[in-house]
Amino acid sequence: MEQARSTRVPPGTTHPFTSVADPTGIDPLELYAAGIDASDYVARVAPLVRAAVPEIGDLLDIGAGGGQLGRALRDREAVWAAIEPAPTMQDRLRAVAPPPRLYEIGWREADLPEACADTVLAANMPAPLTEAAAFLVRCRRWARRSVVWVVPAQNGPRGLCLAGCLPREWHGEDETPGVDLVLANLPRADQPAIAARTDWTFSAIVPDLVRLSSYLADRLSWSRTDTRRLALADHLSAQAVPVAGGHRLSVPRASTILVWRQDS
């Protein structure tokens, strides 16, 4: 295997982390969406959803992101609607051919009619992890047949994109599997009818490892003089695989598909 190029700077050169620099300009949502584009996420998750819900029908995709999973699941003769408040992701959704019916708003503010979709999908969004009971009420209100959530299942970091490339003592994130948090915050009567797990790999193609390491260090609130910044750049470089367009960083992930039936 070809070795990744080092991000070390020559002796006597000022490293960009040691001086005040412009913001990296990396959009965390776009970084994640681009990683989903380059990953096997849809290929692993979509078949499980289809097996649990063979007839998707009219689909309401909450927190649709770049629309990768919704586009794979949609029934071509049915309506695909997306709730997405982030402008960057709205631009991605508009570029899909054909695009979904787009609601440029968050799920709390969305005032959609009851039973407006056959299937309500929420994949990789924070609401199930932080407001499971209230969010499920809203999803059930909009669904005629099924509610599907896709939540993290792995013992590993969930919040910071690519935190899985870093040592635990650096990122300090809660590593409780997201599915455990979701199920613990739902009463017995609201437990899902189906829970199915699948493993996949998040793979981000990064043009500039130094820029990425600066972004991650900023997100971790490390000062500009923190010596771990240099170590972080080298740590990422050691894992990166050179590919067309930059470097590939890969993180093992797992998701659980949770399904509720409206007639259960």
Image (cartoon, rainbow, N blue to C red):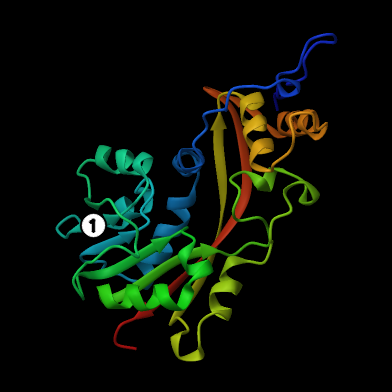
Split into 4 quadrants, where in the image is the C terminus?
A: bottom left
Q: Residue at x 57, y 48 (%)?
A: 201
Hey, which residue is sitting farthest left in the picture?
A: 77
| Residue at mark 1 | 81
Amino acid type at mark 1: Ala
Q: Residue at x 43, y 82 (%)?
A: 193
Split into 4 quadrants, where in the image is the N terminus?
A: top right
- Seen in the picture, residue 15 relative to 90 is either above or below; the reply is above
**99 with respect to 84 (left or right):** left
Q: Residue at x 49, y 47 (%)?
A: 40
Q: Position of residue 131 (x, y in %)?
A: 48, 71
- Mark 1, secondary structure of its residue: strand
* The quadrant where residue 249 appears: top right
* The quadrant where residue 2 appears: top right
Q: Position of residue 64 (x, y in %)?
A: 36, 53
**68 with respect to 38 (left or right):** left
Residue 140 or residue 194, whichever sits in front: 140
